[in-house]
Image (cartoon, coloured by chain):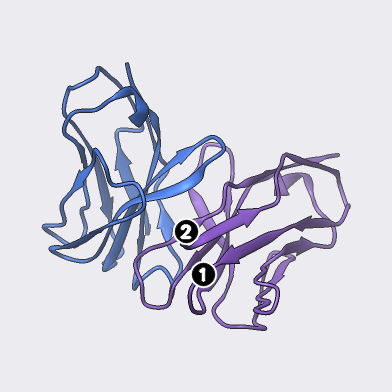
Amino acid sequence: GDSVTQMEGPVTLSEEAFLTINCTYTATGYPSLFWYVQYPGEGLQLLLKATKADDKGSNKGFEATYRKETTSFHLEKGSVQVSDSAVYFCAMSATNAGKSTFGDGTTLTVKP
Amino acid sequence: EAQVTQNPRYLITVTGKKLTVTCSQNMNHEYMSWYRQDPGLGLRQIYYSMNVEVTDKGDVPEGYKVSRKEKRNFPLILESPSPNQTSLYFCASSLIPFSKSEAFFGQGTRLTVV
């Protein structure tokens, strides 16, 4: 069945460090892929998305590229800030479908 | 302000006592969904609704019911709660199915069943 596997956390970085959070998926067909972020005490917010192979989603300095050949959608940011501390979820959904599958979430802590 | 509102935010209840968690959105979204979030398991989809009077099971529907009598509301019903339903619950909505548009999430309901 469909599944999303995320890099295990927690991840702790110093401010201005480079961030990579790995995400791979298993799906029939070609799903849309998402990264959602959850700040403490809040619901999830969409960070970025990609709907087809080779698409690059980007927002707030974060980027992720839809790689069909490696079934991956890794999240990257060149220079993290303390305010980026949150839980990051990789997710996917098949085209026009109501079902969605989330990864386990990766907790990021950025220290000054 | 566009938002998804869940109530209550926190609830402690006893095994077997029926409860309802409400979810309302003011964005005229067709699609709504319920998730539960558990440590080490991420978010798992319970039920979703593509439109009024249309609901479908997600990955973990056992022990839950939903209804979609009007577009803005999508209540989650636990007819006979058990301790394994202790979790953090999120409601979400989007204009069209999840795969095509951004989903907006409520702030969550932390449920404890003793």
Image quarter for residue B101? bottom left
Q: Separation of disc 2 and disc 1 at Cα?
A: 10 Å
- Residue at the image position 21 percent from the left and 46 percent from the top: B75
Q: Do labels 2 and 1 share a chain?
A: yes
- Residue at the image position 22 percent from the left and 52 percent from the top: B74
Whether residue B73 sits left or right of residue B58 in the image: it is left
**Which amino acid, mark 1?**
Ala
Q: Nearer the viewer, residue B108 or B79?
A: B79
Judging by colour alone, the chain drawn in blue in this rendered image is: B
Circle 1 marks a residue in which chain? A
Q: At which x and y percent is residue A98?
A: 34, 67
Q: What element carries label 1?
A: loop
Q: Nearer the viewer, residue A78 or A28?
A: A28
**Dots 2, 1 in contact, CB < 8 A:** yes
Count neighbours of disc 1 (C-alpha within 10 A) and say few if under 14, some if 14 to 19, many if 20 or more: some
Determine which residue is flagged by label 1: A27
Determine which residue is flagged by label 2: A101
**Which amino acid, mark 2?**
Thr
The quadrant of the image that shows the C terminus of chain B is: top left
Circle 2 marks a residue in which chain? A
User: What colour do you see for chain A?
Assistant: purple
Mark 2 or 1, nearer chain start:
1
- Residue at the image position 86 percent from the left and 57 percent from the top: A18
